[in-house]
Image (cartoon, rainbow, N blue to C red):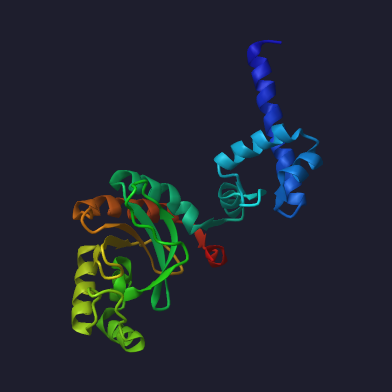
Amino acid sequence: MSDSASDRNSSIQVIDRLRALLDALAAEGGNAPLKILAAVTGLAPSTAFRILASAQDNALLTRDAVGHYRFGPHLQDWAQLAHGRSDLRAIARPIMAWLRDQVQETVNLTIQQDDEVVYVERATSSRMMRVEQVIGSRAPLHTTAVGKLMLALNGEAAVERYATRTHLPALTIHTLQDIPTLWKDARTALERGYALDNEEAEIGVGCLGVLLRGPLPWNAGLSISAPMERRQESWVPLLQEAARRIDTRLQGQTVTLDMGALS
């Protein structure tokens, strides 16, 4: 047998073994350790481990702190597509990673729930000094760049109602706490197409935010978070381009978001 034919057979064998491991994982309810998967498939533990590790590197599987394997985000994204649905995070992730690599700062995806923004995905900067928002965390609309844009969408009266409901809690000394100033800032941001957070949610942190305009069941936005001294408004065109790319990918999609996965 030629070397090329041998290589092809070896590659096919790996695919067959990966399929067997995935079937075994499904049979165990999507949560199983190496020992069980190797036993069910009849593979040597060392062989099973190498294949599972490669699948983990490619986001087909994840492995938790006690060594149990689960189906990974790539498989979950493909399952969504097969059923005619797309997860917002799956659509946004590669574009968020592209934007992070351009600016070398953390990029956040948020949606609006009632009077708060919820952080649903992030692409984290590799810098030693960086800003990290916890996925699933929340913040009052008026304290974030994207949140102010969301407030402005429904006009001044809606901002006044929001202020009455929430009393505009201050997270820092820079949080906007009077209605005229908040409305002016939010309206100006919406008119120019991007908003700023000037240490209004956290001292030392500045953000740039834009809205997503694609067909979504919630208001959503994209933002860059950075230490205040590094934040640059020159990043706005890149941020807007990233949002445009996400909006383009949203067209014709039935978009979902598993909020339970955020907790």
Q: Where, by quadrant of the figure, is residue 144 drawn?
A: bottom left
Residue 153 shows in the view: no
Vertical order, 225 against 20 (above or below): below
What is the residue that sits farthest to the top in this orientation? 2
The quarter in which the N terminus is drawn is top right
The quarter in which the C terminus is drawn is bottom right
x, y (%) of residue 258? 55, 64
Residue 11 as seen in the image, left or right of residue 103: right
x, y (%) of residue 59? 56, 44
Vertical order, 100 against 151 (above or below): above
x, y (%) of residue 140? 36, 75
What is the residue that sits farthest to the bottom in this orientation? 164
Residue at 32% in and 66% down? 146
User: Which residue is more in the foreground, 108 or 32?
Assistant: 32
x, y (%) of residue 61? 61, 46
User: Which residue is more in the foreground, 174 or 207?
Assistant: 174
Residue 240 as seen in the image, left or right of residue 91: left
Residue 242 shows in the view: yes
Residue 111 as seen in the image, left or right of residue 66: left
Numbered label tally: 0
Residue 50 as seen in the image, left or right of residue 35: left
Residue at 24% in and 73% down? 186
